[in-house]
Image: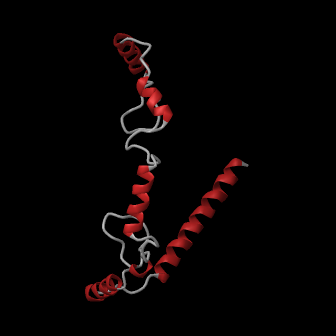
Amino acid sequence: MSFKFILVATLATAATLAWQSAAAQTSASAPVSREQRKAETAAANKAGQLTPAGQGGAPVSKSAAPAGSAVSRDQRKAETAAANKAGQLAPAGATQKADVADANRKSTKTREQRKAETEEARKKGELVPAGQGGPTK
């Protein structure tokens, strides 16, 4: 029974691959000349449909750019100055209470204890490699 199943599965896979190969060959268009490709690229560039170098997103049309802010620069500056005068602006940097609490908290272990724990974790393979998301196994 299992031999028949394997045989049928193999034949079905081969038939599917052969069909896909044949369909791909028949649907392929004639090759495009270098001049045609350059003309198409120039037209797409002029229309703003090319993706900028180094950016993996979909092409963004130049006409789809935002029209600008509804608030003028002078209005924004006046609002910021008023908020600063009222003390409503947060200082730059880490301002979360948990961040400040962590920075002020003293360590409960000595440097030697931390080094010993790290060495033990390294020997057991429990350390997370640099740039990796989880421990190696």
Q: Is residue 50 above or below residue 54?
A: below
Q: On the rendered structure, is 29 left or right of 1?
A: left
Q: Position of residue 32 (x, y in %)?
A: 33, 86
Depth order, front residue of 33/89: 89
Q: Which color mode does the image show?
A: secondary structure
Depth order, front residue of 2/79: 79
Q: Is residue 123 above or below residue 44?
A: above
| Residue 136 visible in the displayed image | no
Q: Residue at x 27, y 85 (%)?
A: 38
Total marks placed: 0
Q: On the rendered structure, is 71 left or right of 8?
A: left
Q: Is residue 131 above or below residue 137?
A: below
Depth order, front residue of 85/80: 85
Q: Residue at x 50, y 32 (%)?
A: 98
Query: Quick one: which residue is furthest to the right in this view?
Result: 1
Q: Is residue 89 above or below residue 134?
A: below
| Residue 97 visible in the displayed image | yes
Depth order, front residue of 135/59: 59
Q: Residue at x 37, y 39 (%)?
A: 131
Q: Where is residue 91, by image quadrant?
A: top left
Q: Position of residue 7 (x, y in %)?
A: 64, 56
Q: Position of residue 137 (x, y in %)?
A: 47, 29
Q: Position of residue 113 (x, y in %)?
A: 39, 11
Q: Residue at x 41, y 50 (%)?
A: 84
